[in-house]
Structure formats: C-alpha cells, structure tokens
Amino acid sequence: MKKSYVILVTFLMAGYWIALTAQTLPRAGELIITEIMANPEAVSDSNGEWVEIFNSSDHAVLINGLIIKDEGSNKHTITSSADLIIQPGGYWVLVKNKDTTANGGVQGNYQYSNFTLANTADQVILCLSDETIIDAVAYETGWPLNAGASMELHPDFVQATANDLPGNWFPARIAYGAGDKGSPGQPNPAVMGGSQVITTATVDIFPNPNSGHFILDVKFPRATSGEIRFANTIGQNFSYVSFKNMLQLHEVIEAGFISPGIWFVQVVAAGQILTTRLVIEK
C-alpha cells in the first residue's frame, strides 16, 4: 500500500507540473502577428477590426496580462478570469467586437478595448506587462492596405523579424462572413503572387561567357526565400546555395566544379523557376 501511495503522489505531482509548464508566458518571438484587419468594408471599423497571432513555439503559452498597443495612446491589457492559453501551432484572433453578427462574421478568441487600427499607418505591438516586446508590426504607406481586405503574412515568413518587411505581406483574397476578405484563425494561403516575385526578379551574370570565374547578381522585388541551382543541357543539376528573406544576392563564383559547356542558372523561389543561360569556356 505504501508503495502504491508513493506512485500515486508522484503521478499527481507530475500532472501538476505539466499543468504549470503549460501555462508559461511567451518569450520574445514566440507569438507572431500574422494577419491584420485595419480597414473592414462590410462592417464599420469600430466593429470589424481584428489582429491574428500565432504561437510559433513548441509549447502552450499563457497570454493573460499581455498588452496590445501602438506607439501612441492606444493600449489594452489582456484580462480574463480564466486562463487564456494558445496551444503550439495555434492561431488566436483578437477582435474589437466578439459579436459575429456585428463584426462581419469573425470568430474571435478575445475582445479588446482602447485599441484602434488606423487605415494608413499604425503599429501593432504585443508585449509583456513590463513592456518587453514579444512581436511588433509597424505598417505605413507601401504596405498592402486595401479596404475590405486584411493584410496577411506569407506562410514562408512567419517569423518575428520577417513580418517587419512589407514585401512579406499581401492583401487577403478569400472572403469570409459578410464579405470582407481574410482568413482569421486559419493559416494564411500562399497567394502572395509568387510568379510576380520571379518575373520581376533580375539575374545578371558577368562576364558571360566566362572561364569559370564570374559574378552572379540576383535582385528580388520583395524579401524572398529559395535556392540557386545549376543545370546543363543533358539534365545534370545541383543546388549551389540556399537563401532566406533576401532582397539581393551577390555571389562571386569560382566554377571549377562546373565542366565547360552551356549551363543554366536557375533561381527557385515562391514555387517558380527563373532560368538564365550561362556559358563556361575553358
């Protein structure tokens, strides 16, 4: 009996420990701002604004006591008598009005107050009670601010630094509820316009032809992730370098590993391939 009692106590203590560790506050970069509806059209701003956050960590986080604010006077402390926990890989939607009949059909997880999103330029700052920033997004002219559509962070750039760049956001294209566009509480679709990333990218090889020593310059219209490959006319190909969140690549290449002949430099990004002819003469 004594041994069983000890095992039971140990089991109960282990369960209590799991419960405690499941309710930890997020560290910087663990919660990511992934979608912002600043200018709804189907309903008023006072009812239809919302912000989506994503738990990028491998553990549940407690958001009681966190603050959502801007750089001005807007500030709201997340308050609830119940524990508000976002599971790993989970999305939460913070809404201005939780009533789906008034907010355009958004299923919100939490209703805030004293926080308003300007239509042209503003900030969304998520921080701890001591003002330690977990994530922040500052948008302005040049960001994809379309009336009736949220700004969605491309799924390739769900990081606390990558969401600082306007090129990693795109206007939502899928309608919800009363007709505004967005994907509140769901992963954002990869519809940033990958073909545009590639078709407007530039690739320069200098000199070309060359003897195996050349400079490769690639410029993208927005921060892009992908890889550079080399391929020849008989189907041989290999990856040369991978890149992440880059606007420009500048590579000085000593191509002793490439045999003479006609090759193709392939820039692979956003599900598209841009090919440029390369001639190696020796």
Image: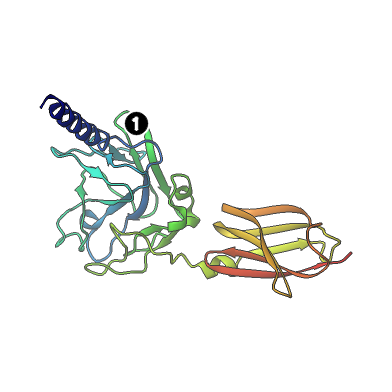
Q: With respect to residue 128, does 54 lie above or below?
A: below
Q: Give the farthest residue toward the left.
A: 1
**Residue type at tag 1:** Glu
Between 15 and 202, the one lying in front of the other is 15
**At x 31% / y 40%, what residue is drawn?**
69
Helix, strand or loop at label 1? It is loop
Q: Nearer the viewer, residue 67 or 270?
A: 270
Residue marked by disc 1 = 131
Q: Position of residue 275 (x, y in %)?
A: 67, 70
Residue 254 rendering spot, x and y as whole percentages: 80, 54
The N terminus sits in image quarter: top left
Residue drawn 18% across and 39% down? 83
Task: Tell me where residue 104 sits by quadrant.
Answer: bottom left
Mark 1 crowd level (few <14, some 14–19, many ≥20, 10 Å Cα): few
Residue lying furthest bottom: 234
The quarter holding residue 101 reads bottom left
The image's colour scheme reads: rainbow
The image shows residue 106, relative to residue 72, as above or below, that is below
